[in-house]
Image (tube, rainbow, N blue to C red):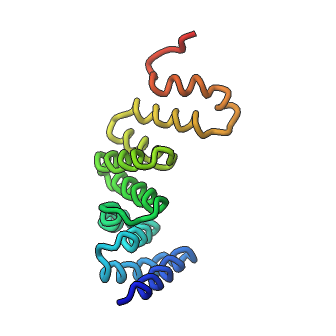
Amino acid sequence: MTARTRDARLAEAVALREAGDRAGAKDRLVALAGEFPEDVEVAFQTAWAHDALGLEAEAVPYYETATRRPGLSPADRQGALLGLGSSYRALGRPEEAVATLRRGVAEFPGHGGLRTFLAMALYNTGEHREAVGLLLHLLAGTSADTSVTDYRDALAFYADRLDETWPG
């Protein structure tokens, strides 16, 4: 099969998913992944199609293939790491979720979604202080709400010192 045929079939399946035919997209992508089992882009799109249907367990092997080596665009790599970490968490595998999401945050430190899902996974592993600190940093750094931004310095201070008081 030519790369052009692969590309056209991948584009058709993605278009189906975007048009709301998630099951049809999944079926086409599973067939394509069977023909291109190590193709990270096909694997990512196949994982996403499963995830969109709430089939996290079936999505995981595709996400694992997609994140194993380079080849995805930065945006797709972010999505694959977030999807894999989120799927691990949803399946009751929080330690794997934390490891995956930490890897994602290390690669993409400015990605708020990865940091948010990492905080949830940290909560699930009992690392509550780190989870809340991560969320406070995210809130202080990204909120446009003046009732939050008025306290940005305090939030940034407390994010790493939840057990301390303000030095004033």
**Side (left or right) of 144 relative to 135:** right
Identified at 48% across, 75% down, the residue is 22
Q: How many marks?
A: 0
Against 22, residue 9 (above or below) is below
Against 84, residue 120 (above or below) is above
Farthest-out residue, top: 168
Q: In which quadrant of the rendered image does the C terminus lie? A: top right
Residue 108 is situated, as x and y percent measured from the top left of the image, at 45, 49
Identified at 36% across, 71% down, the residue is 43
Identified at 50% across, 23% down, the residue is 158
Q: Residue 108 or 58: which is nearer the viewer?
A: 108
Residue 106 is situated, as x and y percent measured from the top left of the image, at 39, 45
Q: Residue 74 or 117: which is nearer the viewer?
A: 74
Residue 37 is situated, as x and y percent measured from the top left of the image, at 29, 76
Is residue 110 something that shows in the picture?
yes
Q: Residue 20 or 152: which is nearer the viewer?
A: 152
Q: To which quarter of the image does residue 68 belong?
A: bottom left
Is residue 54 something that shows in the picture?
no
Identified at 50% across, 48% down, the residue is 111
Residue 137 is situated, as x and y percent measured from the top left of the image, at 52, 34
Against 109, residue 24 (above or below) is below
